[in-house]
Amino acid sequence: MVASLFVVLAIITVINYEDGDRYIDRVAEVRQTSKDSLAGLENAIKGFLKDHPFSQQIDAWAAKQVYLALGFFLYSAALLGIDACPMEGFLPDKVDEVLGLPEQGYSAVVLCAAGYRSEADRLASAAKVRYKTEAVVQYID
Ligand SMILES: Cc1cc2nc3c(=O)[nH]c(=O)nc-3n(C[C@H](O)[C@H](O)[C@H](O)COP(=O)(O)O)c2cc1C
């Protein structure tokens, strides 16, 4: 694969009421509705922010949200015929420092290279190794 794109997926490390307002403004814009009609949602978001001051626990939760986005990224890339290579095992503090993420209120969680597969990459055409469905999926009647 020639990685023409290298994505750093990051969590927001500080969140406050202004972020809640930004989200509500965006909902109103996208759904062409008034902010007043979104008062219930706004109260729910601000209530959540009040009850959950940022902590390690919230960082872990935020990281899981990032992995949902990564899942859609991988899936969408595959549908477009683009290969991707998600990566952990890096030093987040170093990546943060190089990219100046702390100053922007972000911290790197996972990295992902993406690009079109190289003809010369013999691993690209190797069969995908997956456990059998029955080994990883349990059906409950
Ligand atoms: C530097 C580097 C770090 C990686 N870190 C991870 C990892 O933390 N977890 C993981 O599942 N795969 C990791 N991978 C493997 C790739 O994401 C790999 O393509 C993928 O796991 C295999 O997916 P596939 O079976 O769909 O080809 C890493 C690969 C590289 C090159």
Image (tube, helix red, strand yellow):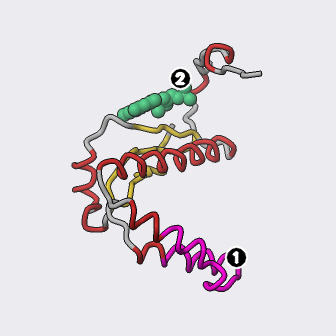
Q: Earlier in the sequence, mark 2 or mark 1?
A: 1
Relative side of 83 to 113, left or right = right
Q: Where is residue 81, by image quadrant?
A: top right
* Left or right, 35 with reference to 13: right
**Does residue 132 sit above or below 62 in this rendering?**
above
Q: Is residue 13 left or right of residue 93?
A: right
Residue 135 visible in the shown view: yes
Quadrant (top left/top right/bottom left/bottom right) for the C terminus: top right
Task: State yes or no: residue 25 in magenta.
Answer: yes
Q: Residue at x 29, y 49 (%)?
A: 56
Q: Callout 2: 10 Å neighbours few (<14), some, many (20+)?
A: few
Q: 94 left or right of 11? A: left
Kindly report the distance in space between the C-alpha atoms of the residues bearing marks 2 and 1.
Answer: 45 Å
Q: Nearer the viewer, mark 2 or mark 1?
A: 1
Label 2 element class? helix
Q: Given the current orientation, which residue lies at the most extreme right position?
A: 141
Kindly identify which residue carries mark 2.
123
What residue type is disc 1 on? Answer: Arg
Examine the rendering and report whether any part of residue 120 can be seen: no
Q: Residue at x 68, y 18 (%)?
A: 133
- Magenta stretch prevailing secondary structure: helix
Q: Which residue is mark 1?
A: 31
Q: Residue at x 41, y 75 (%)?
A: 17
State the image coordinates of residue 39 (x, y, percent, origin top left). Answer: 59, 79
Q: Are the residues flagged by discs 2 and 1 in contact, CB closer than 8 Å?
A: no
Task: Answer yes or no: disc 1 within 8 Å of ligand 1.
Answer: no
Q: Nearer the viewer, residue 65 or 124?
A: 65
In this rendering, the answer to whether 38 lies above or below 82 is below
Q: Which one is nearer the viewer's eye here, 36 or 26?
A: 36
Q: Amino acid at mark 2?
A: Leu
Q: Which residues are magenta?
A: 21-45
- Residue 18 lies, with reference to residue 74, above or below; the image says below
